[in-house]
Image (cartoon, rainbow, N blue to C red):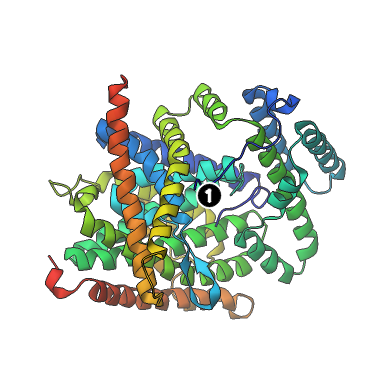
Amino acid sequence: MHIPDGFIDGKTAAVSAALSAAGVGLALRQVRRELPARKAPLLGLSAAFLFAAQMVNFPVAGGTSGHLVGGTLVAALLGPSAAVVVVTTVLIVQCFLFQDGGVTALGANIFNMAILNSVVGYAVYRAVCHWLTGIRGRVTAIAFAAWCATVVSAISCAGQLAWSGTIPWAAAFPAMAAVHLFIGVGEGLISGLVFLAVYRARPDLIVETQAGGGPKRFGELVRQGLLATLGVAVFVAPFACSWPDGLDSVAGKFGIKHTLAAPLWPAPAPDYQVPGMHWAVGATAVAGAIGSLVVFALALLMGRWLVPKSTES
Amino acid sequence: MNVSWDHHHGRPGSPIHRLGAAPKLGFALLLIVATVLMPIEHRAWFAGVAGVLLLTVLLSRLPLLFLARRLLMLSPFVLGVVLVNAWQPAGRANWLALAVKSGLCLLTVILVSNTTPFSQILRVLKSIRVPSLLITTIALMHRYLFVLLDESERMRRARASRTFTQRRPFHWHTLGTVVGQLFIRASERAERIYDAMCARGWK
């Protein structure tokens, strides 16, 4: 999903760079406030870890292989703001050192993969954790959250490409969303497995499981969530002609809820009035809605299968 | 043994290598932004940029084969966009514009990153007031990136020498554990690094 130079135009690059700068600034402030000095090198090491982990190839059917992307995994391990900083670092180094992703597209890439991915992933993770307790629930939560975050990032990326006039929305959205509906399943599976491995060996390393039940995340999530919502509103909303009344008021009132609902968006197919040209857009939206239910069931099964009842605590 | 990621090709003595990092980065950024913003009709601009870049390639004495290989290494994402574009009515002109613009920008970044030491890039970032926490994180990542890649390679080899079957579900489970272990090792290393930093007077 690394957008190269030349694929997005000036206005998209400027808007996404501004959003990313604000998001990374907020995250840095939050991290500086809550991270003990003892943990300062952990951010850099986690970034190096994420890069090395992305090099590990997981075999997929047919001789192809996939790899971890990791925003949601890091958010679940270290908290959302730390995840934004870590993934941003990885993207900056990939851009300058390995020419993966363009310089002018750096803002867009940071917005999609660092901010949106971490924030959406973490919000979904916490919501599901609230409902399903225990390590089984956590594995389920992270697998589902990683899937949602991957799909939302892909949709935002499609929105940026369409807004730049690189590819029309009617082609970009189905292509990006459909591919990432599948990639997301792999991402969810890997994230769940890695999280479980860390949890079994060193549960004390995971921020959320540390004494005191983890810091309060609500305010942080609201600020980042509003920013993410604003970005989705700018990049994606113009293409959804029949968005239910006033996106701005909805976003303003329910920053978080809106982010949570994002994976299910664009809402049911009947909203799309033009079936002829845009049938693929509607079909993809329906597939996404059904897909989220299927993936959630898969994540539940995975949790059950990986964590035997006896070790559940 | 070591995973080799040598990214400083060419002769450090070339005029391009000797240029200051700040003007080089500034000029490259200007070139990239202008190339992205320029409408594709201005053929002369793109020809000019290509000329400047070719001159830089020759002056920097980077291996041409290396440059060509790096330029042609397309990500699945780029291939996907090109494929989708090929279906569109106005696809071809659009495709050409994309190829020219992203190709020129990619060559610019390759040239800069292969002729400028990373520590100098960090110094430039510091001088334009990028938050210090972000710079520390980037510097640490760059320092330990290759260490962790080595570590991951060692773990892969150790696993390959111990597991006999590679039934798929089992294989995924093993890989998940390996990556989890990599995170644990990175965290433990971070603790040791902090102790070492304190011992040397970091505050």
User: For this rendering, which residue is in front, A23 or A269?
Assistant: A23
Q: Would residue A79 be seen by someone viewing this image from the given angle?
A: no
- A208 left or right of B194? left
Q: Would residue B120 be seen by someone viewing this image from the given angle?
A: yes
> How far across and down, in percent of the image, does residue A133 sit?
17, 65
Q: Disc 1 designates what residue?
A: A109
- A58 left or right of A39? right
User: For this rendering, which residue is in front, A123 or B181?
Assistant: B181
| Type of amino acid at the residue the image marks with label 1 | Asn
Q: Residue furthest top?
A: B201
Quadrant that contains the N terminus of chain A: bottom right
- A96 left or right of A221? right
Q: Tell me which residue sits at (60%, 60%) in the image.
A: B77
> How far across and down, in percent of the image, does residue B31 sit?
72, 35
Element marked by disc 1? helix
Q: Tell me which residue sits at (41%, 44%) in the image.
A: A47
- B78 left or right of A18? right
Chain for disc number 1:
A
User: For this rendering, which residue is in front, B202 or A228?
Assistant: B202
Instruction: Determine which quarter of the picture holds residue A14.
Output: top right
Quadrant that contains the C terminus of chain A: bottom left
Please say if B124 is above or below A176.
above
> How far across and down, in percent of the image, does residue B84 sit?
67, 68
